[in-house]
Image (cartoon, rainbow, N blue to C red):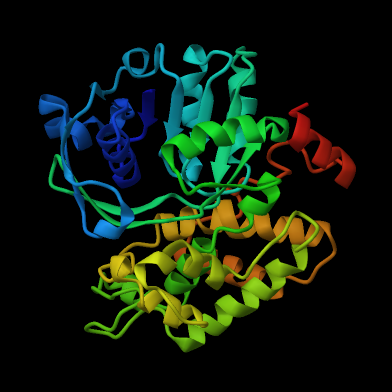
Amino acid sequence: MKISVIGAGRIGWATAGHMALSGHEVRLYEFPEFRDSIADLSKTQVLKVINVCRETGIPSGDVRLAYVGTDEKKALENVETVLIAVPAFAERKAAEICAPYLVSGQTVVMLAGCIYGSVEFLKTVREKGNACDIAVVEMNNSPYAARKIGGDAVRIGCYKRGVGIASFPGNKGREAWKICVSLFPYAELWDSLLATGVSNPSTGVHSTAVVFNPRYVEEKEEVFMYQDGKHLSAIGESVGRVNFDMDMERLQLDGIVGSLKPWRYVFRDWYEYLGVHGNTLLEIMSSNPGLAGGLLPTSFDNRFLTEDISMGIWPLVELLERYGFCCDVCKSVAIIASSLSGIDLKGTARTLRKLGLEKYSTEELEEYIFNGV
């Protein structure tokens, strides 16, 4: 399959490497303003993939990509599938880049794991004058935990099994799932993007880790997220209780937006094949060998807030309030995050209101998500 990967960050490199090692022709695109991040890789087009867990089934090795660069035409023309590997707040920009080259029958997959990415993407493509008939898929989390090493290598620490996917429009879900499962064999088809969108457990874990460790963030201390280190770990039992309370608020939507399970068990299911176990958030996260090196961010202007709060928690709060549910804990964490960081995380949130869909009734919203019109 001819695949275009948009975004050359850690997830983009992991995706490009995995797809290329699986036998696909892969083109990797980066936005021109970040061309320095691919300077070395673009010279050789050979990406070194280091998979630290053999059980994932992802091979390690050096693999040649078909294209690495900042020319969107070379990256996107005549491909069958487009994988969007940018932060959720950059997905609109990715849609603008892709719009001139998309054609009917293609599948686009959003890898950020944040709600409404597929809706925003397709709306943007249509606003740019392209009326192509495509399916846009979103996941409830990126398939990988990875980091870049040097200028031409990527280390894949974790590979999630059972990531949920849903498409926009929803009536293309099964057709799109067939494409996704050929690339990500353990992907599971869910009924609605509303369910996948509120089922990304990283939004709660990442945001509370920062909110309850602000001094370590601003002092740029090296603090492990889940394992004990110099300053113990960022996630302890008390932070776990906050996550639990946030999750109990979220689970009020169970049966309304689709079938939901507790965040901590979503994490456990993804990694159970690696021996991950436990019932509490801390037990589950600290038993994952692939996350052993995960560190607390050293800046508030980080995806743990700018993505997980703006594109995860605030849209969740909006849905909970739409259905008349209490969401005091989720809302408080989101408000405190803005106060601590000095960033207007609510103002940059991707919500139904921002997408022009807030006036839809429940029935109208469900029909729009299913039919795309």
Vertical placement of 286 versus 12: above or below? below
Q: Residue at x 76, y 62 (%)?
A: 320
Please determine whether, in this image, residue 366 is positioned above or below residue 275. Answer: above
Q: Nearer the viewer, residue 211 or 316?
A: 316
Q: Position of residue 52 (x, y in %)?
A: 22, 59
**Count of number-bearing discs:** 0
Q: Position of residue 76 (x, y in %)?
A: 39, 17
Where, by quadrant of the figure, is residue 117 drawn?
top right
Residue 365 can be seen, yes or no: yes
Could you tell me which residue is drawn at 49 percent across and 62 percent down?
Answer: 202
Across and down, in percent, residue 28 comes to: 30, 28
Residue 104 vertical position relative to residue 289 in the rendered view, above or below? above
For residue 216, above or below residue 153: below
- Residue 1's spot in the image, x, y percent? 38, 23
State left or right for residue 32 relative to residue 182: left
In what quadrant of the picture does the C terminus appear? top right
Q: Residue at x 70, y 35 (%)?
A: 170
Give the side of residue 37 with respect to residue 271, left or right: left
Q: Nearer the viewer, residue 59 or 321?
A: 59
Query: Position of 100 compared to 198: left or right?
Result: left
Residue 207 in sight = no
